[in-house]
Amino acid sequence: MSPTKSNIYLTLISFSSAWITYFAHEAFHWFAYSLLKIKTHFKLNTIEILDNNLLIPDSKQIIIYGSGIGFTFFQAFLCFYVLKRKQIF
């Protein structure tokens, strides 16, 4: 089967949206660290804490980890809503 323009376009959109989602997910973790005034360095696929001796309490870790997960769930809900409204799904 030869690739059609629509298949190539769909593949390009899928890879682009996956990369943007991954980046935004990590950025929300970084925003949480910043709001909690924890000094970090944002890298492509992780957040590096600058103070290696810093112990982060569980209550703050829930906020940090939950921020990325919360964004992902929000994005999934938003996409489902848009697709449902346009009667695609």
Image (cartoon, rainbow, N blue to C red):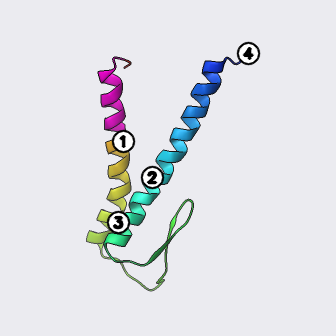
- Let me know if residue 81 is in the magenta part: yes
The segment highlighted magenta reads 75-87
Quarter where residue 14 is shown: top right
Name the residue beneath numbered marker 4. 2
What's the amino acid at mark 4?
Answer: Ser
> Which residue lies under the disc numbered 3?
32
Are the residues at dot 2 and dot 1 in contact (C-beta closer than 8 Å)?
yes
Q: Residues within 10 Å of mark 4 (few under 14, many from 20)?
A: few
- The quadrant of the picture occupied by the N terminus is top right
Q: Are marks 4 and 2 in contact (CB under 8 Å)?
A: no
Residue 83 is covered by the magenta coloring:
yes
- Near mark 1 (Cα within 10 A), the count class, few <14, some 14-19 or many ≥20, is some
Outermost residue, right direction?
Answer: 2
Identified at 57% across, 60% down, the residue is 44
* Figure disc tally: 4
Neighbor class of circle 3 (other Cα within 10 Å; few <14, some 14-19, many 20+) is some
Which amino acid lies under the numbered mark 2 shown in the image of this protein?
Ala
Q: CA distance from mark 2 to mark 3?
A: 12 Å
Q: Position of residue 78 (x, y in %)?
A: 32, 36
Quarter of the rendering occupied by the C terminus? top left
Residue kind at label 1, given as amino acid type: Gln
Identify the element where label 4 is drawn: loop
- List the residue tagged with mark 1: 75
> For the residues marked 4 and 3, what is the alpha-carbon distance in whole angstroms?
46 Å
> Mark 2 — residue?
24
Residue 24 coordinates in the image, percent (x, y): 45, 52
Q: Quadrant of residue 85?
A: top left
Q: Secondary structure at mark 2?
A: helix
